Image: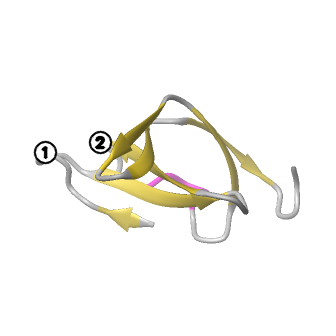
Amino acid sequence: MTLRPRGGAPALEAELYDGSDVIDLVWLGRRKIVGIEPGRVVRAEGLVSFQDGRKVMFNPRYELRPAGGP
């Protein structure tokens, strides 16, 4: 997880790995989201785009899941 300004505004970035591929989740205008932390199981939904050759999802809808859950 990284806090990185994008265009002068804060942005929280997290790398999500599902066992087969990686996608960057980016929440614009956020410095922190309670519950989003390294190792947390998260289900994310949104439009996938490519930036600098990487998959990225901006402001995804998300659900915090219990550890070991589907």
14 versus 62 height, above or below: below
Task: Kindly state the secondary structure of the residue where label 1 is placed.
Answer: loop
Frontmost residue, 23 versus 53 = 53
Under mark 2, the amino acid is Gly
Residue 44 falls inside the magenta stretch: no
**Mark in the foreground, 2 or 1:** 1
Circle 1: residue type: Gly
Report the span colored magenta. 31-36
Which residue matches tag 1?
7
Quick one: 22 or 2, which is closer to the camera? 22
- Residue at the image point whose x is 66% and y is 70% from the top: 39
Q: Looking at the image, which residue sits at the far top? A: 47
Q: Foreground residue, 29 or 46?
A: 46
Residue 31: tell me if it is visible. Answer: no
- Sequence-first tag of 2 and 1: 1
* Label 1 crowd bin: few (<14), some (14–19), many (20+), radius 10 Å: few
Is residue 66 left or right of 54 when viewed as pictured?
Answer: right
Locate the N terminus and report the quarter of the image it occupies.
bottom left
Q: What is the x, y in percent for residue 10? A: 24, 51
Alpha carbon of mark 2 to alpha carbon of mark 1: how far? 10 Å
Q: Residue furthest front?
A: 53
Does 27 sit left or right of 66 as displayed? left
Query: What residue is disc 2 on?
Result: 29
